[in-house]
Image (spheres, rainbow, N blue to C red):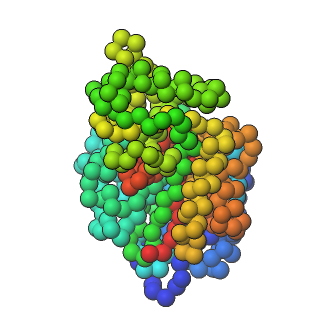
Amino acid sequence: MSTPAPGRGPRCASAVSRQRNLDAAVGEVLEALEEGLDGATPDLLVAFATHHYGGDLPRLGGELREGTGAAGLIGCTGAWTIGSGEELETSPGVSVLAASLPDTRIAQVRIRPPEDGGAETLDFPLPDPATSSVLVFADPFSFPTTAWLRAYAESDACAAPLVGGLASGGVAPGQNVLWMGSEPYTNSAVALVLEGATRLEPVVSQGCRPIGPPLVVTGIEGTAVTRIGGEPAAKAFMSALEGLAPEERSLFEAGALVGRAVDAARTEERAGELIVRPLLGLDPRTHAVHVADEGLRRGVTLRIMVRDAASASSELDAVLKSARESEAERAFGGLLVTCNGRGRGMFERENADAELFARHFGSGFPLAGFSASGEIGPVGRTPFLHGFTASGALFTTR
């Protein structure tokens, strides 16, 4: 727990290093952070590193805390790391955001599944959700992230915005590393709670756009949509597909996705108000449409969704433009968690997501992040686990 002394203005500094030796990388990062904070001791570090550092990774958290004097630290491994305006997709990387947060209480929490000795996976303490923000990093092999997020959304804690992601780069249990303070962990999840003057403002882009007409669900059996607008669901869905332009149908066939309106009362939704999930298939026997979404309910609106590089850039650009217009004067740093499937694989060029942050908030805007195997962020006020998403947060003042 850390309570900064009053009187200092909030600020962040970020640094990345491509050094292949961990000690050299830490030294380079520490030097840059000290310069960025004018020698001030940060209250919090958020750190990410690639697997290039192998057996040295467990000591990263302790070395960063010792070198900066920061009381709080949280982070995880990623397939690649992100800094201000750049994504280090092809090199080793250590990326750190250091924050000085006056009048802000910082709590670190490790969340363990019951089989690992945890008392209750879904138990998560928040002293005051109305004045709190939450950052969560989890191991994809050992932590039930989707179930935990569902319980979080149904609890009083949901008043606190929550962002984060799943550690990546490891291909088997025990290979990813999470840091909380100086301690490394290879399973469970680690969380950070900020309470008081500092708020994490989520910025989430699922990289899709809706096409075709709104499809109102009028019959449902579990995750199978049986009727849309009063007629067999498969018939209504195919009719909507046939009405698309050929290029839109091609995009949909390349990755069949459906968006569900988070607010069931609305029939016209923007991309950012839809939770995107895979279409699993159409059943020719029952004429049902199967969607990988446990949140389906009668009366909700579905949209056909397509994902491509242009849609992904356009949506993130719009999300950041909106955030800049509302938070520009208060935002003093940021985090970016981007999907492993984005980067050059999606955009056919480097730094696409990170450059959009720099375009909207300035080339010197402190930013740190990593590529994840799943991204956590809200649609509306409800946090979800996403794929192919850019999920970030701006450090702002209340």
For the view shown, which residue lies furthest in the top direction? 285
Residue shown at the point (46%, 47%) measured from the top left: 269
Q: Quadrant of residue 309?
A: top right
Q: Position of residue 57 (x, y in %)?
A: 57, 50
The residue closer to the viewer here, 395 or 239, is 239
Q: Is residue 68 above or below residue 359?
A: below
Q: Position of residue 265 (x, y in %)?
A: 33, 47
Q: Is residue 318 above or below residue 220?
A: below
Q: Is residue 314 visible?
A: yes
Residue shown at the point (61%, 44%) measured from the top left: 312
For the view shown, which residue lies furthest in the bottom direction? 7
Q: Horizontal placement of 265 versus 375: left or right?
A: left
Residue shown at the point (54%, 27%) measured from the top left: 243
Q: Is residue 266 above or below residue 192?
A: above
For the view shown, which residue lies furthest in the right direction? 349
Q: Is residue 189 visible?
A: no
Q: Horizontal placement of 100 versus 134: left or right?
A: right
On the rendered image, what quadrant is the C terminus found in? Answer: bottom left
